[in-house]
Image: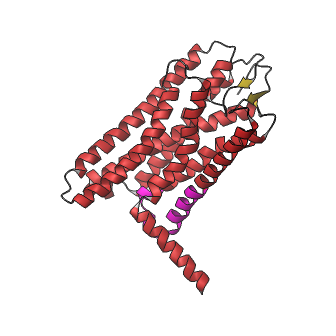
Amino acid sequence: MVNDTAVLEFRLLGFSGNPQYQILLFIVFLVIYILTILGNFIIISVVTLEPRLHLPMYKFLKNLSFLEVCYTSTIVPKMLANLLAERKSISFSGCMAQLFYFITLGATECYLLAAMAYDRYLAVCEPLHYIVAMTAESYTRLAAGSWLTGVFTGFLPCLMVSRLQFCSCNLIDHFFCDISPLLKLSCSDTTVTEAVIFILSLLVLSSCFLLILVSYLLIILSILKIPSTSGKRMTFSTCSSHLMVVTIYYGTMISMYVRPTYRLSSELSKAVSVLYTVVTPLLNPVIYGLRNKGFKEALEKIVIRHHRLHAL
């Protein structure tokens, strides 16, 4: 990627300049990051080790957990390092790489969540058709398609931003290389870049979010036909949990990127960004995995098996 600019590095202003707050934020974000990595690796390990979980639903969950590890690791380690560093800098190429991975993995998550909602729709609303529709080949196509489409989605915005000019000021008022602060920092005409990113964000986020909402609406309508009250309650609980995570993720992403101009204050932008870069990756393993009955049973089985082996 070519860039006609004298700026070789950026300085990330991050959060509050007060050293006490920096240390407190470092501890909080470090704990969340460790829990996120552990939670998602538990899901990956359990789904891999337990043959009963080698089903499309859990394979999607395993994909999502791997994605969350990559997604949060794109942002959080550098953020943690800068919270303790006096010079909070990132090279131009490092900034563009972070931006590319952030957009790519964020878009991939949108597609993957939509694929998971479609899988649940088939399982609940079309149970007799599910085995035929969601074969191993169908799962592979949906999962691989989500990742490949995510890569293509991330390429164009990153290419356009990397070709902007950054004349003298290199201070990014954010804790990572995001689109909005980079556009504000550029001394080029960003009208075309903003328009392209707005249209792309609108297409990706709105279409995926609409597909998820329609899927869950049909699932809820199907649940209402279940005669058992306990069955309704359990399924509603699962759906509401999924919708909660989806709403947090898509709500914050849409508020940040589906806007023709970038008018949120820098502090509000940082607070909203924390939700989808730090909090959501922690919530996903809890909501999608640890609240799932089949997953919890498999986890207990593996733990008991592990204890028996050590007892011998």
Above or below for 161 versus 243: above
Residue 156 seen by the camera? no
Seen at 24% across and 51% down, the residue is 223
The total number of labels drawn is 0
Of 176 and 111, nearer the camera is: 176
Where residue 71 sits: x, y (%)? 59, 44
Scheme by which the image is coloured: secondary structure
Residue 28 seen by the camera? yes
Of 158 and 10, nearer the camera is: 10
Specify the segment rendered in magenta: 38-59
Above or below for 56 versus 168: below
Magenta portion: prevailing SS class: helix
Q: Is residue 10 left or right of residue 275?
A: right
Seen at 61% across and 15% down, the residue is 190
* Quarter location, residue 168: top right
Seen at 34% across and 39% down, the residue is 213
* Quarter location, residue 14: top right
Where residue 145 sits: x, y (%)? 48, 43
Where residue 39 sits: x, y (%)? 56, 57
The C terminus: image quadrant: bottom right
Of 121 and 43, nearer the camera is: 43
